[in-house]
Image (cartoon, helix red, strand yellow):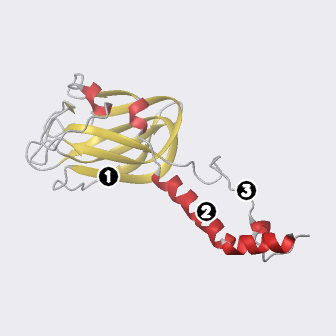
Amino acid sequence: MKNKITKFLNIFNLPKLLLLLVVVFFTLQVKAQTNLALTATVDAFGAAQAPWQWFNINNNNIPACGVQEAFVWTTGPPDQTEWMSWVWPTTIFTNRITLHHAQTTGRFLTGGVIQTWNGAAWVNHFTFSNLSQANCENEINFPTVGTTRIRITNFQMGTGQNSNPNFREIQIWSAPPPSGGGGPVLPPIANFFPSQSST
């Protein structure tokens, strides 16, 4: 019976099959990110007034480039008091934000500071700059952080109109917790290999 089982496993090359499963598992962990912005309470402020149509910033509707869904009022150039924020009821982990700009001819956010909430105050987490104004969509990658609040402030603007940055959508993507942060753990598989003897 043992020989039959071994032959059966060898037919399907179990070691390679298990390796493939491991690769698929971790690939899915990297790629299966969800848009956390959809579940956030959003707000923004600039030029001493509330933003325009800011409820559209996380409505999961992304029209073609050239269509304005929402914007933050600012001076020209921004006076560094402007901000936009996302708040969740529980801790989230993220390492990537996607900006869907409304246009590329002006009103284009090219840089800023990503801040997180430490429970008592806002702290700087990552500074980004020089986003390409040739792209109507830009991604900002940064070290994974766990927080209940994120905001972008210290706006930097591109060429053309240098105030009132406008957008079609802003997405904030989930990320696995940092090492040791409670991420998924694979079960041990060493003794599944037919070439290894059990003890």
Q: In which quarter of the image is the N terminus?
A: bottom right
Residue 191 against residue 117 in the figure, above or below: below
Query: In the image, what residue occupies the spot 81% across and 75% down?
Result: 196
* Relative horizontal placement of residue 170, taking residue 93 as reference (left or right): left
- Nearest the eye: 105 or 69: 69
- Circle 2 sits in a helix, a strand or a loop, which is it? helix
Name which quarter of the figure residue 25 lies in. Answer: bottom right
First in sequence: mark 1 vs mark 3: 1
* Front tag of 1 and 3: 3
Which residue is the extreme one toward the bottom? Answer: 195
Q: Indicate which disc residue 139 carries.
A: 1
Label 1: how many Cα within 10 Å (few below 14, some 14–19, many 20+): some
Asked if residue 117 is positioned above or below residue 174 in the image, the reply reads above
Q: Which mark is residue 177?
A: none
Would you identify the image quadrant in which residue 154 lies? Answer: top left
Q: Position of residue 149 (x, y in %)?
A: 45, 33
What residue type is disc 1 on? Glu
**Residue at x 56% of width, y 64% of height:** 23
- Residue identified by numbered label 3: 187
The residue depicted at 27 percent of the width and 51 percent of the height is 138
The residue under the point 23% across, 26% down is 51
Where does label 2 land, which residue?
Answer: 22
Q: Note whether 155 is above or below 40 in the view shown.
A: below
